[in-house]
Amino acid sequence: MFGLDDFDIKKTRFYEEVREEVRQEQTQEVVMRQLTRRIGGVSQELQEQIGKLSIEQLENLAEALLDFATPADLVSWLQNHHP
């Protein structure tokens, strides 16, 4: 009727942007849970810094945090990997 038979929302820029945003939020949530379990509570300031990381940076942090023993390790990682 309106030519919507061939419309695929998954091919739109909006869909891709939303999908990427959801992926970033989910990755951030997992990293925060991992950090809490590994080094204990994470300060609000550090949470805000983590919230500004790209997906690639979050994935790198997820791998690096396996070697963290203290919150200082997180601070050091953020200083070296976040502008």
Image (spheres, helix red, strand yellow):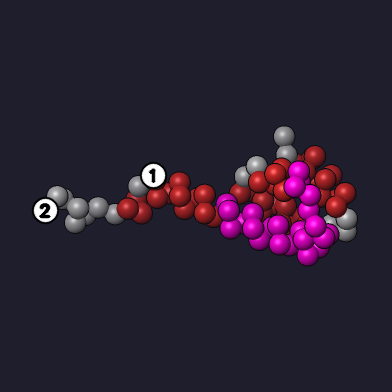
Q: Residue at x 67, y 51 (%)?
A: 58
Residue 5 place in picture, x, y as percent: 19, 56
What SS does tag 2 mark? Answer: loop
Residue in view at x 84 percent, y 44 percent: 76
Check the image and report above or below for 81 versus 19. Answer: above
Any magenta on residue 66? Answer: no
Give coordinates of residue 6: x percent, y percent: 21, 54
- 10 Å crowding of disc 2: few (<14), some (14-19), many (20+): few
Which residue appears at 39% of the width and 45% of the height?
A: 14
Of the two numbered discs 2 and 1 on the same chain, state the one appearing first in sequence: 2
What amino acid does circle 1 point to?
A: Arg
Q: Main secondary structure of the magenta part?
A: helix
Image quadrant where residue 48 sits: top right
Relative to 34, 13 lies left or right: left
Q: Which mark is residue 13?
A: 1
Q: Which residue type does callout 2 highlight?
A: Met
> Which percent across, then down, holds residue 3?
16, 50
Farthest left residue in view: 1
Q: Which residue is mark 2?
A: 1
Name the residue: 78% across, 65% down: 37
Looking at the image, can residue 42 be seen?
yes
Q: How many marks?
A: 2
Location of the C terminus (image quadrant): top right
**Can residue 66 be seen in the rendering of this structure?**
no
The magenta stretch is: 24-46
For this view, does 29 lie left or right of residue 23?
Answer: right
Q: Secondary structure at mark 1?
A: helix
Query: From the viewer's perspective, is the residue at label 2 or at label 1 nearer?
Result: 2
Dot 1 surroundings within 10 Å: few (below 14), some, or many (20 or more)? few
Disc 2 to disc 1, C-alpha distance: 24 Å
Q: In the shown orientation, is residue 7 left or right of residue 1? A: right
Which dot marks residue 68? none
